[in-house]
Amino acid sequence: MLLIKKIMEEKRITEKESLEIITEMISRTKDRYLGDGSILLMWGYLTVAVAVAVWILLDATHDDMWNWLWLLIPIVGSISTPVMVRRQQSRCGVKNYSDKVISKIWSVVGFSTVVPIMFCLAFQLIYNIDAWSMMLAYVLILVPFAEIAQGIILKEGILMSGGAIGLLIGIFTLCCIAGWVELGAHWYLPLFMAAFFAMMIIPGHMLNLRARQR
C-alpha cells in the first residue's frame, strides 16, 4: 500500500509539473507576441491602405480595372512577412511548440488564399466573369478563424474579440453575395476596412502598448 501511495504521489507531481510546463510555454509564447504586434499591424495597414486606394480610384474613374490593386496585398505581404518573422526569431530565440502551432495556422491561411485567387483570375481572364467578391468573403472567414485560434492558444481576449468581429462581417458578406446584394464600394469598403481595424490594427497596437507597459 505504501508503494502504491508513493507511485500515486509521484504521478500527481508529474501531472502538476506537466501542467506547469505547458503553462510556462504558453506564457513565454504570449510574452513574445505581446512584444511584437508588428506583423499584425503590417497586414492590417497594408489591407486598409489598398482598400482606401481602390475606393478612391473606383469613385473617381468608375473603372473596375483598379480592382487589380487588391493583388498588392498578397504580393507585398508575402514578401514582408518572412523578413519580419526572421527578425522576430533573432530577438526571441528558438520557437517552442505553441509558436510552431501558430505559425502553421497562419501558413495554412496564406497558402489557402492562393487557390481562390487563381480561380478568380481564371474566371476574369477566360470567361470575363468578375468573381472577386468571393475573395472578400473568403478572407473574412478564413482570417478571423485563424485569429480566434491564435487568441485561444495564447489566451488573449483582444485577438478572439477582434477575430469575432471580422467573422461577423464575413458572414454578412456571404449573405450579401448569396442574396445578390451588390457590394458597392461606397458602403462595403468601409465595412471591410473596419474588419481589419478590429482584427489586426487595434490588437497589434494593444499588444505593443501592453509590452511597453511591462
Image: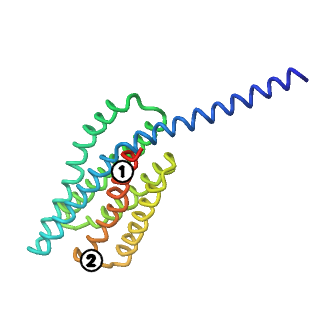
Depth-wise, is mark 2 or mark 1 nearer the camera? 1
Q: In this rendering, is residue 44 above or below 91?
A: below
Q: Quadrant of the C terminus?
A: top left
In the rendered structure, the answer to whether residue 20 lies left or right of residue 96 reads right
Locate residue 92: give its quadrant.
Answer: top left
Q: Position of residue 109 (x, y in %)?
A: 37, 49
Q: Nearer the viewer, residue 16 or 196?
A: 16
Label 2 sits on what residue type? Trp
Q: Quadrant of the N terminus?
A: top right
Q: In this rendering, is residue 151 above or below 167?
A: above
What is the number of the mark on residue 18?
none
Question: Residue at label 1?
Answer: 209
Q: Residues within 10 Å of mark 2 (few under 14, many from 20)?
A: few
Q: Position of residue 203 (x, y in %)?
A: 38, 55
Whether residues under marks 2 and 1 lie with C-beta atoms below 8 angstroms apart, the answer is no
Question: Residue at label 2?
Answer: 187
- Tell me the residue at 28%/34% (across/down): 87
In the rendered structure, the answer to whether residue 25 lies left or right of residue 58 reads right
Disc with the residue nearer the chain's start (2 vs 1): 2
In the rendered structure, the answer to whether residue 59 lies left or right of residue 11 reads left
Q: Residues within 10 Å of mark 1 (few under 14, many from 20)?
A: some
Alpha-carbon span between mark 2 and mark 1: 32 Å
Label 1 sits on what residue type? Leu
Q: Position of residue 71 (x, y in %)?
A: 20, 55
- Tell me the residue at 43%/68% (across/down): 168
Locate residue 193: give its quadrant.
Answer: bottom left
